[in-house]
Amino acid sequence: MRWIRAAGRGLLVLVVILSGCVASGAAREDGGSGRGPLTLATAGDLTGYLGSVLEGWNRTHPSERVTLVELPDSADETHAQMVTDLRGGDRSRFDVLNIDVNWTSEFADAGWIRPLSPDCFPLASFLKPVEDTATYDNRLYAVPYVTNAGLLLYRKDVLAKEGVPPPQTWAELERDAKTIAPKYGLDGYAGQFLPYEGLTVNAAEAVYSAGGTILGDEGDRVTVNSAAAREGIDFLARGVREGWIPEKALTYKEEESKQAFQEGRLLFLRNWPYAYAVASSPGSPVAGKVGVVPLPGPHGPGTSVLGGSNLAVNTHARHPVSAGRLIAYLTSDRVQRQVLTLGALPPVRADLYKDPELVKRFPYLPTLRSSVINAAPRPKSPRYDQVSLVVQAVVRDVMTGHETSSAAVRRLARELDAISGR
């Protein structure tokens, strides 16, 4: 029960000093100030921007210097290393954690990260849906740092030759993928369909776009056994069955699918904004030929899953006051601009999506803003890793023709019930 878990977390901090933003553990070498050096753990920084960002902090906060700890690029490996470290309690190496948005519930439920005061961070300046990814049990446990939403990339040169607009509905996407793509020697549509976290995301987007859900009440209620969920899963399965989703797409993760589109082998691609930026860059075979719109749904624009990461404070952070100050710095307007301009990552501050200079440099920002505003988080659960594995396995069986969508939602309901302990 949650009140028992909460009591257990309270035992970890018998001596509490409130900094106003972050609950601190017992005073240590900092003399009770809660301030001092920090470590920031994150998945691999592929663009190398974080070093420059933290240089600015270290230059102006010499007594609170941050050491960056880069973990593997793979989300699964990063998660495993963070969990192993956090289970070490007060022997943990990490103070601030840059965590995937769907880990917030798990880490909060386990007592690994501290509750934060909403008043200390610029939440009102953020895109509205992102705050929900940082809460658990109606409390703020992290601060949104980077957001993301799935988009539909398309070959605008091909659609222009055919005189058709980009698709807004599944029916339009299917029609164009079936009839236009073969005329140009292209495959129709792909997403990330290998059985890993990307398949969970693609499946959730299909279910959400059809009006369905997977879990409710922070993972305590299973809601997937519905006509809408069947419709969403069958959309993906039908694509493979009818051939407008090529079978090789069942092996695609983000990078493989991006490569297929960038090399001119796909008409439509569901991916994150980075894929648009790379495919549109000078030297890309499809540079100048790429358009982007929100993901389609059954009757109009669909629903993307929110991606991105949140910043959280380890329950056993050595200097929790400094940790809170660092998070405020990383979510400031100036640093959020650097997140976009140096890191090519979508920021969480809403006003940046309307900045004329930024929109000129990153023309997909208005579309991305619309997609984020209408996006939804992945199913919330303190056992999200188990939930995701079940979704991947069941949806994979449907897409490979080993199970019907009707049987799949019933199986999903049974297996998710078992995970939730019902």
Image (cartoon, grey):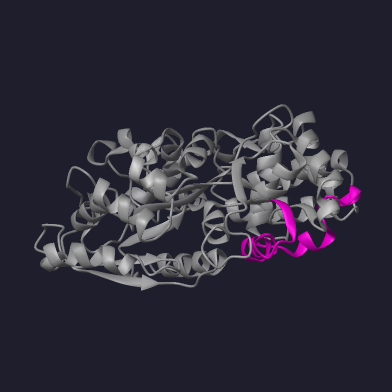
Q: Quadrant of residue 253?
A: bottom right
- Picture residue at 14% right of the left edge, 67% below the top: 59
Residue 242 lies left or right of residue 18; in this view the side is right
Q: Is residue 127 visible?
A: yes
Q: Is residue 213 visible?
A: no
In the rendered image, the residue lying farthest to the left is 31
Residue 20 lies left or right of residue 98; in this view the side is left
Q: Is residue 210 above or below residue 416?
A: above
Q: Nearer the viewer, residue 402 or 19?
A: 402
Q: Is residue 280 above or below residue 41?
A: above
The residue range painted magenta reads 240-268
Magenta stretch: residue 241 in it?
yes
Question: Which of the image's four quarters has the C terminus?
Answer: top right
Q: Quadrant of residue 43?
A: bottom left
Residue 385 lies left or right of residue 357; in this view the side is right
Magenta stretch: residue 256 in it?
yes
